[in-house]
Amino acid sequence: MKRYLAVAAALMLAASGLLATAPSSAQSSKGEIVIGVQCDRTGATQIVGTVLCPGLHDYVALVNSKGGVEGYMIKAIEIDHEYKVPPGVEAYERHKKEGAVTMSIYGTPHIYALAAKLTEDRIPGTSPGFGSAAAADGQRYPYIFPIAATYWSQAAAATDFAKKQLGGTLKSKKIAYLFYDNPAGREPIEVLEDLATKEGFQLKTFAVPPPGVEMGAQVLDIAQRYRADFVISHLFGGAPSVSIKELKRVGFPLKKVIGLVWASAEANIEGAGGFGVADGYYVMQFAGVGTDYPVLNEIREMYKKQGKPAPKEMASTVFYNRGVLIGALHVEAIRNALKAKPDGKITGDDVKKGFEKINNFTLGGLVPPLKITPQDHEGGGLVQIWQVKDNKFVKVTDWFAAYQDVVAKHIKEAGAKKS
Amino acid sequence: MALYRLPIARWTVAALGILFFLVIPFTLHEYFLSVANLVWIAVIGALGLNILVGYTGQVSIGHGAFMSVGAYTAANLANRLGSPWPVNLLAGGLMAALIGAIVGIPSLRIKGLYLAIATLAGQLIIEWTINHVTFISGGVQASIEVARPRLGPVVLNTQRDMYYFLLVFVVLAIIGTMNLMRTRVGRAFIAIRDQDIAAEIIGINIFRYKLLAFAISSFYAGVTGVLYTYFLGIANYEQFQIGVSIDYLAMIIIGGLGSVLGSIFGAVFVTLLPIVIRYAMEAFGGVFFNQQTVLNLIPNLRLMLFGALIIFFLIVEPEGLNRLWRNIRNYFRVWPFAY
């Protein structure tokens, strides 16, 4: 007993000694602007977080290496929450304590859990590609910014794409919606049902229960009983890989399948057995894919100057580029805020207005030409479709959005229901 | 038996009261209060689970689901009927107690690991139901926004308001549990845990008391869920999934089964340790590694350290932090003498 106490006391002393001598970073700039970054590098969605977060940090480092924003340095403080809600709440409060004027939230339950807090504290929080589609309504959720196509816009775009692939009409075609059975997976169904009536196609939904590794029956049903003309697949984590494998196994042509944004990364394709296996599979993206963008060249250049190799995360371009996109939009919002208030004393409210001024900021094609307004926090719901072809992703369409009237109707209904 | 056997005990309680009701809320930054609030929520939940697992000996992996029952009951009442929070809190607790008693029915025939699996099924069924029945979940997103609780004209929305709001219930939960264990009901629970056949022979109605244990434990869970909902301003089913049940089990095992103080220690330990480890690593991680590596390392190392510390404490004292604390206290009681 005594020995353990002694060891514990010694450890505590050592820790406090190190804490006291921890280096403090000196700054030569006008000051620092803090972004609170939540991340998941260890939890359920770590295949996203371990690549996306480095992308965000690299972009911030690039901005700082070029002198910051209007002379101010950007500090992105990252906290990992393991995709659990209480640590996410703690991370939010910690970021607030550190003076964050904008928050990059990560995770659907987290954006729900923090929605009330963000609004009360008047700090903008982003939920790119996840969270509630109804949050696109900037009047109803003034401090929440999806800043990328929501699940409703994604479903609408996927339907439009299917229509073009099936010869310009969906009349009496059969569309299968294969989805992960959680709120995020079910969210697009109401939009798809509306579109089914509007376009006259038949819609059948196939739920995959969590954890999403068992979908043999659903896929067989799609391929051989229902005989779908097109499949919209909305899966997460390891499930997309399984879906590609299973569809391939039952002989369903992958060029009649489109995966929404979380079923669309290199990791998903590799998990299915590689690009050769998934040949033909379409994927939806809210950030550019590939390595051929000026901003990515600059990041590589930055690493070269420091005498370091480019980080290996850059090879996983889908998630890495999304990280860059998130970082870039936050930085742009801060830039707009600082332009309006050159004294640098910006608050969450200023950054919120900064987000709402983002217009046609494309970062050389990596970011869609979003137009975020006080009404529309989604920025237009733009996506690109890419295809697995010749061992890489090949761009099939440029940025587009579809059936915006239908999506807008649902956003309005959701707002009316809740207020 | 006197409530305070030594005068120092009375002073300790008074000092703790002053510390938690006056010193902490007025000296600490809002951030630390938010952490304290997370701890308070965990304490109530852990106390509830300990009544069932620690005192009555019925293993349950459904605690998270019972919390969600309370949360959705309160959220629906608040939004559909506009009822005030005390009503919702009670209703949430009672509804969870009812569902808990139903899920507890298998405990009448099966024990141990088998019961654990049965409650696991309960967890999954409740999750599925909330997820698919839009009447309960309020829509496909399975999230219901709830207005902040009010006390008369005051809206409780800052972390300090929430701190007091939650602390009151923590005190009630602690006193409630301690009292419960001094009653006939509590004694019956302990008798069932120690040997249920013997308990039945001396006249304890196993049927009634096992279900009562499930109901009381779930009542605590339901109240935790309601408080959590008011704390966040939203009920969302993803906050109450199976992982939460496991976390609560971890709390009471680390803290000490069958003790009030153990539940508190466990809740504090499991909630705070990751935060403390992160602070420590942020402070001197930069000494050893570059920034990008630290970012990747912190969360992973934190998980490893967390696991290692749990193993360490359980090896040092398998009966949990509560026993460790008693050992330390006993050692210092006669210090500097060995006995």
Image: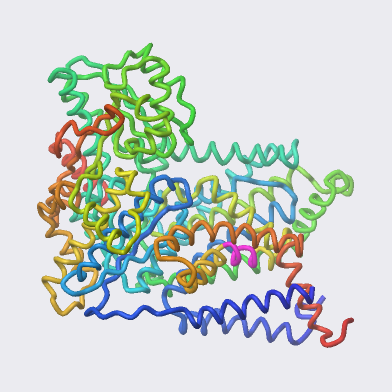
**Position of residue A157 in the picture relative to residue B66 (left or right):** left
Kindly identify the residue that appears in the image at 59 percent across and 67 percent down. B268
Relative placement, left or right, of A109 versus A403 is right
Q: Position of residue A322 (x, y in %)?
A: 28, 49
Query: Of B101 and A323, which appears nearest the observer?
Result: A323
Quarter of the image where the N terminus of chain B is located: bottom right
Horizontal and vertical percent for residue A361? Answer: 13, 54
Residue found at x 30% / y 66%: A35
Residue under the image location 41 percent in, 15 percent down: A250
Find residue A144 and report its image quarter. Answer: bottom left
Give whichever of A90, A262 is nearer the camera. Answer: A262
Residue B231 in the image: state x and y as whole percent.
43, 62
Answer above or below: position of A212 versus B338: above
B327 or A394, which lies in front?
A394
Question: Is A387 one of the magenta-colored residues?
Answer: no
Viewport quadrant of the C terminus of chain B: bottom right
Q: Is residue B333 above or below residue B190?
A: below
Q: Percent position (x, y) of residue B227?
A: 48, 60
Q: Residue furthest front?
A: A307
* Total marks in image: 0
- The residue range painted magenta reads B264-270
Q: Is residue A133 above or below residue B333?
A: above
| Left or right relative to B117: residue A17 | left
Magenta part mainly helix, strand or loop?
A: helix
The image quadrant of residue A124 is: bottom left
Q: Is residue B281 visible?
A: yes
Q: Is residue A370 left or right of residue A40?
A: left
- Residue A203 shows up from this direction: no
